[in-house]
Image: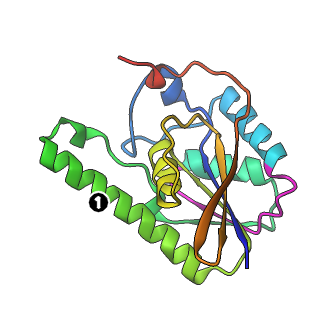
Amino acid sequence: MKRHFYFFRHGQTNENKSGTTYGNALEAYLTDDGIAQAKKLGEYLSDKDIKVVYSSPLKRAIHTAEIAVNNPNVEIITDGRLIETTFGFWYSDGDEIQKRINDNFNRIKSCLDDIIAKDTHTNIAIASHGGVTRALCYACGEKIAEIKNCQCFHFVLDDGKWEFVDFFDTGITVQNKSDMPK
């Protein structure tokens, strides 16, 4: 049985816009552009027959999912394993950084594995963050460098094998100071 998965990052937040790299340390909210991005994402998802959304418990991811799915009959299930990492560990030594990267990947992958094992829906969305979305894509065999706000990656799982189908970009250009090289 083919199962479709749609992984997407939340819309632009006040903190993205201001240049803060905040991970999970701060509860940020969607900007007007972030809301517009979520609505555009909703246009893309509108014919995908999404039956359930798994989301980071952070409000920016939940709010993006609510806007994008725009269907009160679609359950949004939060899972703490989909939360963004904290970024303080980047200031650790090399061995500690690699251990934290591995721990984060394993946490995110365990969430995806549980969804696959326990959820029988054929069209599933996962709303999260840039680092989490990158890890989800990597777990499915795709290395993605940059993930924009509300960018969505479509994968099919068929007989235990992942296939990358396509990605969606809202086309709404925003200036995120947090995405600019320092």
Circle 1 residue:
103
Query: Is 55 situated above or below 120?
Result: above
Region rendered in magenta: 45-58
Front-most of residues 96 and 178: 96
Point 54% across, 37% down: residue: 147
Amino acid at the residue labelled 1:
Asp
Q: How many marks?
A: 1
Helix, strand, or loop for circle 1?
Answer: helix
| 99 lies left or right of 101 | left
Q: Position of residue 140 (x, y in %)?
A: 53, 60
The C terminus is located in which quarter? top left
Q: Position of residue 32 (x, y in %)?
A: 69, 28
Point 74% across, 28% down: residue: 171
Front-most of residues 99 and 164: 164
Q: Position of residue 161 (x, y in %)?
A: 59, 70
Main SS class of the magenta portion in the image: loop
